[in-house]
Image: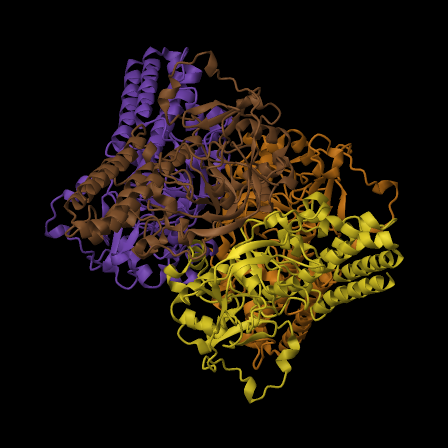
Chain colours: A yellow, B brown, C purple, D orange
Amino acid sequence: MTRMVSELLQAFRKVRKRSVELASSLSPEDQQVQSMPDASPTKWHLAHTTWFFETVLLVPHAPGYVLFHDHFPFLFNSYYEALGPRHERAQRGLLTRPSLGEVHAYRRHVDAAVMALIEMADRDSFDRIEPIVTLGLHHEEQHQELILTDILHAFSCNSLMPAYRAESRERPRGPHSSKVATTQAVAYPIEWLRQPGGIVGIGHAGQGFCFDNELPRHETLLRPYEIAHRLVTCGDYASFIADGGYRRPELWLSDGWAMVQREHLAAPLYWRGIDDGNCENDPSGWLVFGLDGLEPMNPRAPVSQLSFYEAAAYAEWAGARLPTEFEWEAAFDAPGITQMTGHVWQWTRSSYDPYPGFRPLPGVAAEYNGKFMVGQLVLRGGSLATPPGHTRPSYRNFFPPAARWQFSGVRLVRDI
Amino acid sequence: MTRMVSELLQAFRKVRKRSVELASSLSPEDQQVQSMPDASPTKWHLAHTTWFFETVLLVPHAPGYVLFHDHFPFLFNSYYEALGPRHERAQRGLLTRPSLGEVHAYRRHVDAAVMALIEMADRDSFDRIEPIVTLGLHHEEQHQELILTDILHAFSCNSLMPAYRAESRERPRGPHSSKVATTQAVAYPIEWLRQPGGIVGIGHAGQGFCFDNELPRHETLLRPYEIAHRLVTCGDYASFIADGGYRRPELWLSDGWAMVQREHLAAPLYWRGIDDGNCENDPSGWLVFGLDGLEPMNPRAPVSQLSFYEAAAYAEWAGARLPTEFEWEAAFDAPGITQMTGHVWQWTRSSYDPYPGFRPLPGVAAEYNGKFMVGQLVLRGGSLATPPGHTRPSYRNFFPPAARWQFSGVRLVRDI
Amino acid sequence: MTRMVSELLQAFRKVRKRSVELASSLSPEDQQVQSMPDASPTKWHLAHTTWFFETVLLVPHAPGYVLFHDHFPFLFNSYYEALGPRHERAQRGLLTRPSLGEVHAYRRHVDAAVMALIEMADRDSFDRIEPIVTLGLHHEEQHQELILTDILHAFSCNSLMPAYRAESRERPRGPHSSKVATTQAVAYPIEWLRQPGGIVGIGHAGQGFCFDNELPRHETLLRPYEIAHRLVTCGDYASFIADGGYRRPELWLSDGWAMVQREHLAAPLYWRGIDDGNCENDPSGWLVFGLDGLEPMNPRAPVSQLSFYEAAAYAEWAGARLPTEFEWEAAFDAPGITQMTGHVWQWTRSSYDPYPGFRPLPGVAAEYNGKFMVGQLVLRGGSLATPPGHTRPSYRNFFPPAARWQFSGVRLVRDI
Amino acid sequence: MTRMVSELLQAFRKVRKRSVELASSLSPEDQQVQSMPDASPTKWHLAHTTWFFETVLLVPHAPGYVLFHDHFPFLFNSYYEALGPRHERAQRGLLTRPSLGEVHAYRRHVDAAVMALIEMADRDSFDRIEPIVTLGLHHEEQHQELILTDILHAFSCNSLMPAYRAESRERPRGPHSSKVATTQAVAYPIEWLRQPGGIVGIGHAGQGFCFDNELPRHETLLRPYEIAHRLVTCGDYASFIADGGYRRPELWLSDGWAMVQREHLAAPLYWRGIDDGNCENDPSGWLVFGLDGLEPMNPRAPVSQLSFYEAAAYAEWAGARLPTEFEWEAAFDAPGITQMTGHVWQWTRSSYDPYPGFRPLPGVAAEYNGKFMVGQLVLRGGSLATPPGHTRPSYRNFFPPAARWQFSGVRLVRDI
């Protein structure tokens, strides 16, 4: 019991500290900004994750707990209908008050109360609160990824193109760190790994934490297929562009082609042509914006910031297809497979539907996943922005097919 | 061979004639109107189905065929990118020219050419053209249903509430055709039919016609479940409304709740309250608009014109769920089951994804189904507006979750 | 008295007949269509002008008059708040019922009642009803112009480019009716007519009919100026285009330049380039759509279908300016001036503000003009689509600055 | 000459310092935010006014001047087309970089260069630069008002309702500073001041600075009228509301009534009902948000934050009308008149049209006023947020009729 308490405290401190550290290189102004309705300000993420602990853990379970501020539940509730009205999502960037300093004070207030609650807990209370704390930490880790994707989007709207990791600008550059992009990369062919299919187990197994949408564990029936041992690279994707990929409707789903035309898409979200040009005909001119700022396109790096539509069009062009989420999960430990996590989320050809027998979590957390199960696609894996250790083979991320601001890329499969 | 020719000719004549008959009670003005971007004018349907035969059959396969009008391919192409630019979808209602008379002449011109082509065909040609003719007829049958759903939507925008089947206004009314709605319907309980699940075959089998999205036939694994022997009725749905169904966010998917609030939904699309009121508290005041005009709500009739969101919220309220399309198909012949087709399309809990191994039809028809496989939900069954014999157990209809103007309703299932 | 009765009857018959004649070359489908919210279907114009007589004249003044149809006031009220709710403006095109035939019957019913009312009137009644009948006739004449501008807009959305005056297509063409546009027009220089300014009388004077917005007659003070003796021609305007007029922000008002960019304006609304090209660099390639269909641009014809923004940008480019409505009115009878009416409405540099001491008409007609006196610009003159005799020197037409579908052009003035 | 130099330096220092002081109570986050496209962040105002001096004064007139930052002209150009492309207006709030600190450094850099330029100037240079410096200072004063109106709008979007002048929260409140609103105000009747009309001079006269839109001075002809000696108060306006002002279409211009219905207007922009209610029936429940936060409505205070539509509807209800801008200017020194400036801007019934003979300033400043002369209404006077001494009797402010976030109110006139 003591060890469990101390482990939970340690996990709590570690996750909470990491959020603050992720924001530490950002000014109060950076942390204020909301660049589109789907993104949120850093400051809001810091406050919302705190509100989650306050609301789901402290208010019901910490006797005598007093809200840090009566009005914060209105300001920092994201989408929980059961918890009453809330500040409009698209206007989170207007909340200049509370200040960043006040949000840090809010974090400290709640941290102290949570840690006291954990420390004081007897066996029964611990068993009650531990799953809530753990859920809160996984929730906060999800927002840690959003802190990065959202500030990157905000920075991409500023023609100064600021770098989140500003120090990288000064790092010494030898002959091998040339700033000139090249598609003359050493050949880097895909190996196709045969998978037998058949009846496979899907969903979370074992004791550890998982979200409700990974359950229940169940069986599904797969045909044989083969899966690429690596992700699609920027170099691969530049060839798709050079081959007219964004001008050939036959490669696209109907909604995707409509988006290409309506928004004049011609490259991934953060690709820029040298001198503001389109580099369809000269891939060496592509620059890619990322956490280190604007850099020459690296042809061996996994392509990122794709919508599902672009991912699917690429696969069509490549004579392959996207994996279903079940194929992806079944191949997780395939010998020879690489880059399954830690680089980019991988769009699957699976709509985000409930698993057979799915039931949402009880109570407030019922709104965590289930109510979003329509109109979205599943992504699997995890990205360079995902906190280490956050995901599992059964982990289901999801976004609408038009979403482009995530670290989202492609892995191919083929029928046999 | 002769019999095959004569059967094909007979099928062709029958389907083509039925389209014209469906429109025969509508004035040239009725046939001109487009009430929203998703709906099309009757006249456009009559021309577009003709254009399909001209473009896919006559131009490539009828030597010496001359287009009826050089510009009609631009006007009457629906969404085939491979066939060049086309008139904007949302502006089909602006095409007052060609007149309805000219469209009828266009139909006669194409009909004559198609029939001549069939009659003249030798064995080889017949084998080439028969599948195209058959596809064109099934295509036209789909538009026959749309002629009805689309004109009904247009009429619903006119506060005169015209009846498509105007004669119904005059039909004699005895004591049993009272115009007063009642929910005092004879009890009509659902029987739950147990289904064993297991590995089941899905998709079209056998020789007859099917669309490409019903293929390939494959196996899937189902858990045991039980399915309602009948559809959800208007009386059932009125109870959902009376219980605050449209005011309780916990019953709704997130996108659905957003739609309820944004569009102030409070009843199915074609329900009207007596004296323009909301009849949440008095179901006997509901009127329902349909092909016979505005009539008192019949509590035993299947509820119709629901979005997927409403269907799913109803199921949640009823303590059940929507079937997957596989559960629906597997239960098609279940003993005791009724109303599987001919009443309303039944929303399933399955996103419209490709079957394993799916390949689109070759050529122009590649754009028929596959490019729409994202962002939509599958409906199964067939409605009172579907041409008799048009559907099969494996038939997959699909619409976006917000679509409300179709004859779309609900059948429930439950986990065991 | 008898003569006054017979003159009023004659005027009534003449105006009412003219509306029907204007529509006589249009099919029921043509008369059904509404191509944008600002335009209305021909059928609606025919019904609305009839509703005006029914509502403003017959219901209050014809004892025992029975409405032709209880629901028509809801359908055919345009914007009179005092007369209750009404069908949504942007959805007039959805009213396939009543049919065109029923609308004609409505016209006949109301015509008979109006004529009976006039014929039966004693002196007192005549004095009461005569101004209302006269207002109704001027109202109908305004809609006669709209019948033409609105159907022309609808036809312009159809790539078949139908001609309102179809017979013109067949008319024999000699060497002088060449279909090749030319800007080699005989020189056609503007003569600048000096006007002294000073205190001038503005607004309607005398006994005849005028709208309330032309009153009260009052004095205003003008500086000396000079006014062009003719309108700006298509040839003039083609030179503006060729000189980069649509690409030079310094020529444009801010809202106008925003519109140019947002809507990619490059020529007047109904100008088309040969082979769908932009003819900026080759004015002989311009075609202009009008009541006779698509014809080569005539460089001596007055330019038409301009927004106020385009008119003002042209004037800036030409080193001149638009007249105020007072300058225009004061120059109406200037010796040597031509084309003041009967060709195009002429945008003035005057916002549509009330005259000093303006009071709206009493009763329902109060909503006729006054409530629109903000956000619009005054046009003066009258166009080829205006019924002969409809306008006066004091007549004030008005449209928002972005309106382009009217027969609206330019006359220049200069400071001295 | 020395005195002129020292006076210009003193004026420059004073105005520049005042901008910084106005922002000094705002956090970096407050200064970052843009609450709607029409408003700008405080930080942007601070940078843009600096850019104006850099661009219009230093670059052309200070030999050897080096831009503070190459990219700032792109970021901080507001709307000057002649000065090249610029950051999108609606996205000014996304510019978290440069930081507030960098913007202050930018100000210091430019201030030093401007002061050096002034100090070094010989007679000729001084005559060239003095008008530009003066224009820049008046420009900056205009933005000082916007700093206040824009941050107030941002704060109004935050349900915490922060006070710009936070100290006011702590100020001691005696019996006379009761927080309970009352309409039992001492009677405060309007005195109507007769004005003779006739030929009056309009526009700026004399030597001092004015904007180009106040010129040329010219004469206009007015009818006699009478003008209210005071502004319309909150108490007056509460009576309008209580009399159903927002529910009676006959009081409104057509565009105004459409706005009332579309946006559910029921009170001035910053009025809130106690307990979030509408206080139509109990004026003592009204609270008004302002620079001191949310306070009880003071019935004697001038009503503010009205659109032109509301101002005009109020005047109609009160049996009066809005003055033309000429009537307002002619009555500026009328004996007995009060509150002509320093309280609220006063909507006039004059569209913002050019004066006879108007010519824009030469060069870049040509875009300052003239290109906005359509679609806006003139306001006269000056508000509590206007820098003291900034306006003149001939000063013409202008906004679109729907603008509500300014300190804009009403003064009435009547015809005699």
The percent position of residue A19, horizontal first and vertical second, equals: 72, 65
Q: Is residue B358 above or below residue D74?
A: above
Q: Is residue A320 above or below residue D121?
A: above
The percent position of residue A323, horizontal first and vertical second, equals: 50, 61
Find residue A262 and report its image quarter.
Answer: bottom left
Q: Is residue D357 above or below residue D135?
A: above
Q: Considering depth in this image, is A263 or A48 the residue closer to the camera? A: A48
Q: Considering depth in this image, is D296 or D273 the residue closer to the camera? A: D273
Residue that sits furthest to the bottom in the current view: A175
The quarter of the image holding the C terminus of chain B is: top right
Q: Is residue B372 above or below residue D181?
A: below
The quarter of the image holding the N terminus of chain B is: top left
The percent position of residue A393, horizontal first and vertical second, equals: 62, 63
Residue A33 visible in the displayed image: yes
Q: Considering depth in this image, is C104 or C5 the residue closer to the camera? A: C104
The percent position of residue B210, horizontal first and vertical second, equals: 36, 46
Q: Considering depth in this image, is C148 or B92 the residue closer to the camera? A: B92
Find residue A172 and report its image quarter.
Answer: bottom right
How many dots with numbers?
A: 0
- Residue sitting at x 42%, y 37%: B382
Residue D368 visible in the displayed image: no
| A359 sits left or right of A243 in the view | right
